[in-house]
Image: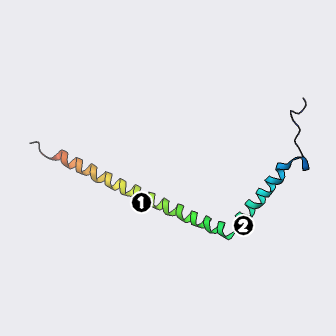
Amino acid sequence: MPPVFEMPKGENFVEMAQISAINKEIKALERSETFAHLKKQEEFIREDSKASVQALKVSAKAASAKRKKQREEANQLPEL
């Protein structure tokens, strides 16, 4: 079965030069100090957010237990 299309190669493939230029720019940005600083900042924010969510979960669970206790105590009161 013959190929559906022929892949352009070398100079016939103008987009390859553009792709290569973009890849070089990406690699340069990834090696920059700013990128490293932002990655560390992102990691700190993620860890801080995770701790905040965990604290909120604990708080919500405690509040739920308190409400349950209050309902049980209210059920023990005599009818009027």
Label 1 Cα neighbours within 10 Å, binned few <14 / some 14-19 / many ≥20: few
Label of residue 75 in the image: none
Amino acid type, residue under disc 1 in the picture: Ala
Task: Give the residue at x 49% y 63%.
Answer: 48
Looking at the image, the residue that sits furthest to the left is 80
The disc label shown at residue 55, or none:
1
Residue holding disc 2: 31
Amino acid of disc 2 = Arg
Classify residue 25 by image quadrant. Answer: bottom right
69 vs 6: above or below:
below
Q: Residue 38: percent from the left, percent from the top?
A: 61, 66
In this rendered view, identify the residue nearer to me: 57 or 12: 12
Q: Residue 24's spot in the image, x, y percent?
A: 78, 60
Does residue 63 appear to the left or right of 42 in the view shown? left
Q: Measuring 84% from the left and 53% from the top, which residue is drawn there?
A: 17
Residue 72 on image: x %, y %:
23, 47
Q: Give left or right: position of 69 versus 2.
A: left
Q: Quadrant of residue 78?
A: top left
Kind of element beneath mark 2: loop
Front in this rendered view, residue 57 or 75: 57
Is label 1 in a helix, a strand or a loop?
helix
Q: Nearer the viewer, mark 2 or mark 1?
A: 2
Which quarter shows the N terminus? top right
User: Which of the 4 image quadrants contains residue 55?
Assistant: bottom left
Q: Nearer the viewer, residue 27 or 46?
A: 27
Residue 60 in picture, x, y percent from top left: 36, 54
**First in sequence: mark 2 or mark 1?**
2
Alpha carbon separation for disc pair 2 and 1 = 36 Å
Please determine whether, in this image, residue 80 is positioned above or below residue 19: above
